[in-house]
Amino acid sequence: MDKIVMSNLDEVIYHETLENGLNIYVYKKKDFSKKGAYFVTNYGSSTNEFKPIGEDKITSFPKGIAHFLEHKLFESEDNEKVFEKFKKYGANVNAYTNHIMTNYYFSAVNNFYECLEELIDFVQKPYFTDQNVEKEKDIINQEINMSDDNINGYMFEEMFDLTLNENPNKYKTIGDKENVSKITKEDLYRCYKTFYNPSNMILVAYGDIDEKKTISLIKDNQSKKKFDKVNEIEIKKYDEDAKVNKEYKETKRNVSKPRVSVCYKLKVPMLTGEERLKKLLFIELLLDMKFGSANPFEKNLIKEKIVETGISWTYSYFDDVILIFVQGDTTKKDMLIKKIDDKIKECKFDKELFELDRKVLKTNLVKTFENPSWVASMIYNNVIKNKKIINNVYDIYENYKFDYFLKEFKNINFDNKSILYVTKKEN
């Protein structure tokens, strides 16, 4: 068992890699009643073209199959519902799929070790039949209908499609009805066998738990199961252009007021580890300094009646692309777009604000360790996105200088953007 010491945070994360390749992380936090675990596979909706284990060529699978597979793992051969099993222990269980991972998790106050074994077992016991796969398609199609009615989710997913050309992150995690209709039992088993091998998975446990007992339980559980030895999974590579796929789209949806979303596409080097973290830090600081509460930009938009309630912003970073989203409700579309564009390109920064924002990020990092489930989330995200736990995050934040930030900003090109304009449907 290894100890990963978080520099300047007085925190320890325990780690062990089993013989079958499963990476286990335990974050022990005394005197916290809530306990839980995340069982994560490095497989999300953007991985649709790959070489299945035991096969000799790259195959294209229906879009949305990773999400479909997540749904099906909650169905067991004994017909006892997974949710009911955890409910008996007073625990909550759930899962989610995004572009890069699928995560199964539970939280509980008592019966942690029983729940941990249940979590591992149901994820590692797939049960797919022609009948239950066809039945699931109707459920997924209903979910697709509901997602189309969610304006925030719709706009977020639509911007991926507008900005990206070849990168498969452009497609919706849930898929579409045409692709869902093509999913077969055989496809699900091929995907499962490839990506749900322990060597492609991470198990993170947290709370007031015994690290030795936790790892021993997992070892014993895995020793009773046989898994194929898997080498590196061959996934199709994509060469994403810096230019956006489509610069403008206008559509009608169920909104009370017209809404504009501006998405900037930034092409960056393929980074991992500390260099990727520094790029994330740059984006966090940039957006807060441009659009945060300490900047009068949003207040001026309201004052000038360009927006009524303000704006929102976020970003997504994957592979060699960063997407920055800024949106707001407005009846003055062109004015809002110009204001956002001028603001994000403006090379004018306050060093005092930079230092304040950097201090806030450091404070938030320290506060993360007050919540064990947040730490566990940080762990699996680090391992999947950065290929390791970055144990000197605090030091990186501490040593990130204003001059370095300015240099980064000068190397950014904000000319490639997509605009989505949503207006109200007529009755």
Image (cartoon, helix red, strand yellow):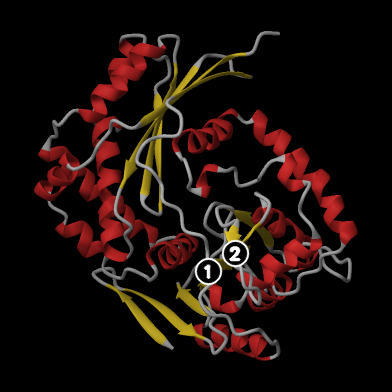
Vertical placement of residue 217 versus 362, above or below: below
The residue that disc 1 covers is 234
Which image quarter is the N terminus in? bottom left
- Mark 2 neighbour class, 10 Å CA radius: few under 14, some 14 to 19, many 20 or more: some
Q: Secondary structure at mark 2?
A: loop
- Mark 1 neighbour class, 10 Å CA radius: few under 14, some 14 to 19, many 20 or more: few
Q: Position of residue 245 (x, y in %)?
A: 45, 34
The residue that disc 2 covers is 58
| Residue drawn at 28 percent across, 30 percent down | 415
Furthest-front residue in this view: 57
Which image quarter is the C terminus in? top right
| Residue drawn at 49 percent across, 38 percent down | 160
Q: Position of residue 197 (x, y in %)?
A: 62, 76
Are dots 1 and 2 in contact, CB under 8 Å?
Answer: yes
Vertical placement of residue 338 versus 264, above or below: above
Q: Earlier in the sequence, mark 1 or mark 2?
A: 2
Q: Secondary structure at mark 1?
A: loop
| Residue drawn at 51 percent across, 78 percent down | 24
Residue 213, by quadrant, is: bottom right
Q: Position of residue 143 (x, y in %)?
A: 73, 40
Image depth: mark 1 or mark 2 in front:
2
Please give left or right for residue 195 compared with residue 352 in the image: right
| Residue drawn at 62 percent across, 73 percent down | 56
- Mark 2 belongs to which amino acid? Ile
